[in-house]
Image: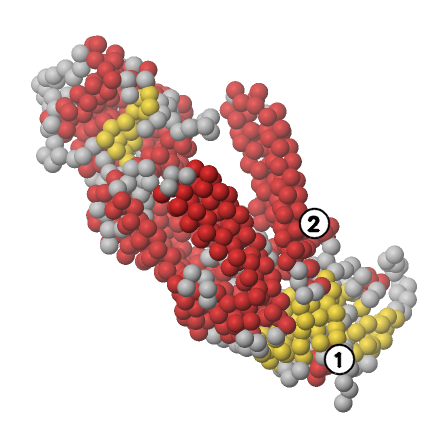
Amino acid sequence: MSRVPHGGTRPPPLETSGDFFDGETAFARPVNLRIDTDRRLLTGDGIDWPVDDIREVMDQAGGDLIVLRLKGDPVARLILRHGDIRPRLPNRRRSAPLVRRGRLFGWALAAVTSVALILFVLVPLMADQLAEYIPPSGEKALGEVTLTQIREALDDTGLSPVSFCTAPKGEQALRKIEARLTAQMATPVDLSVHVLNHEMVNAFALPGGQIVLFRGLIDEATTPEELAAVFAHEIGHVISRDPTRHALRSAGSIGVLGLIFGDFAGGAVVLLLAEQLIEAQYSQGAEGAADVFAHDLMIRAGLSPAALAVMFERFRALGGDAEGFIGHFLSHPGLGDRIAAARDAVPAGFRPRPLLAADEWRALQDICSDGTLY
Amino acid sequence: MSTTQDSMDIRYTGEKGPLFNLAFKTGLLTVVTLGIYRFWQKTRIRKYIWSSVDAGGDTFEYTGTGIEKLLGFLIAVVFLAIYIGIIQMVLFYAGLSVMVDPQRASPQEMIAQTIALYITFFAVLPFILYAVYRARRYKMARTRWRGIRFGMEKGAWGFVWRAMGYGFLAVITLGILTPLQTFRLEKYQADRSYYGSARFTQTGKWTELYPAMKHMLIGIGILVLSFALIGGGAVSENVGLIGFGGFAAFVGYVWVIIGGIHYGVQSFAYLTANKVLGDDIHFTAAPRTGFVIKTYIVGGLLVGLLASVAFGIVGTIAAAFIPLLQNGGGMIAFGIVMAVGYVVALVLTQALSLILITQPILAHYIEKLEIVNADGLNRIAQREAETGVDAEGFADALDIGGAI
Ligand SMILES: [Zn+2]
């Protein structure tokens, strides 16, 4: 079809016909056209278009029609009925130059800047403010909704959310640890503690005083004191409302991101939210404060803060296997410092009192022998 | 003066194959670019569809660009992100939490949540309506036929408060005043529309839309009757009456849906037939409700069938990876295969519904359209280019505007 001219020989003259719209009136004017090879022009009655400046309008239906326009002229159109002119127009596929480039980049920059400002300044600021003002009932509901989402996200079977472990004897032992710790607190908090039947070595706090311990964590601990230490650390997060702040921050960020990426990422957003909450990454300051709170609470409850150090060392030994903890503990560079701080927190001559009897501890280790979905 | 009514047929020449290829290819590009290419995808699909509309031998041209859509979207995002953020903050201060666990919430909490959702909706509603007008205006401004631009005057905020007012009237009269809403809002938009130097005018009367609403009203009547039957059956403890009432409710429900489609098609026909361009250019429109419903059902079934085949293939391929799940590498490969397969099947489904539902219905509307007194078109001159910076950004950000 397309005859590529050989070097030196001149391409043969080309004559064609079509309709011309001048862009001033809606009148279709039939024209006869030819390519003037000397002047490199497509000429016809009232038309002198340089062939290098002719562009084809792309993505047109009906392959038999060819719509041509002139670079720099937004309205005039030539409609030809034969495609044999195509090889003669070297730049027909070149795109239109970007007009008002400065303004475009200005807005793009403004958009990126303001989204970044919203994500990293406005949302955290709002979240911190809201965490102070959110009513307890709202906070509780927020925690319950996110807990359900997390249980659904953790489930591998796709059938039902991960169940709660509720063997009665084990629960009794767990309440005993809870009572021992909360009895020493200055201001009472409304806690609700769950054990999730999942092998992840993890624990986290959710808005509204929800504390979730994983079966994997109980399996990994060798003494009830180690479990109590993690428990106390999570109570520290509850007291400083870290989970509420974090949940609000994630919700805000995800709302903004959902707006930007549209429907396309809609489903992924919920997963991302759950992921974020499991791998709750609080600031190093918040973790340090929760540690200090845990040390203090443990001592007052007659338990050694060194148990926290033992647990931290266990997580470090687990390394890559302890996925959930990568976010929670290992991601912070100061884990060694935190272990040292926990050991240093033990007062000289401190005599801890026992926490659970041997049979109680065994019952707690066996808490997942019975479960419920609610 | 010639008295012959010279009429111009409008044809739709788009085909399934090329449009499917275009939609599928650009759909994959959209996925690869994390959604950014969707503005170019929309532009290219519109270019194809517009150029398929052939009036008197000359095709339409869509001159919008992807980059201006992206820009408009960015502007809208900046605005909406801040606006919606502030609304949420105010709601939290008011103690209305949008997040409530429906299984455990008290009635008060449920009411508070409902109120909060309504406040959010009504706070965003003006922008949705604004976006509707802006999107139509943008499409007009970027449409050309015979080299002459279409256009629409500014007036989005005027549209917003009229749409809210007529919408309110339609709701409080249980839909009886829907024709008033349809007619007045279309007139508001049509009367601000141009083709080149010639202006469109919407003539006709809103009460003449009631015949188109006939089947909707019949459906509503059946529903009301069925509720009365169920209520009567419950009071007299007559199980047969309740069963019959339930059946009637089902019939009424289906009737309302089909009646709604009929109203959409026939009100379009009436409104188009009563538009005038310039002094004397008229239109005829005769779309058939039966064709539209048939396309929805047959096209919908075909899309569903082909989509389930596509997702089935993805599932089969994924199943082949299950034995590899024991090691970490196999897990990652499985995840990647699932994600890629799922996305490809999704893009395929979208492209299929474009060629099997959207395009045939559009083609039907266009083929049934005719321009009367087309001679007058030759006297129409060009109009000024319009340069709105936000394109249809609000419509994109709020995700309205449908398939094309
Ligand atoms: Zn922590």
Q: Residues within 10 Å of mark 2 (few under 14, many from 20)?
A: few
Furthest residue toward top? A359
Instruction: Give the spatial CA distance, label 1 vs label 2.
Output: 41 Å
Identify which residue, A365 or A119, lies in the foreground: A365
Instruction: Report which quarter residue A229 is drawn in.
Output: top left
Q: Chain of mark 1?
A: B
Q: Residue at x 20, y 10 (%)?
A: A358
Q: Is residue A251 visible?
A: yes
Describe residue A292's horizontal placement relative to residue B183 as left or right. left
Horizontal side of residue B96 vs A148, given as left or right? left
- Which quarter shows the C terminus of chain A? top left
Residue pointed to by mark 2: B21
Residue placed at 74% from the left, 60% from the top?
B13
Judged left or right of residue B219, residue A227 is left
Q: Which mark is residue B5?
A: 1
**Pointer 1 with pointer 2, Cβ within 8 A:** no
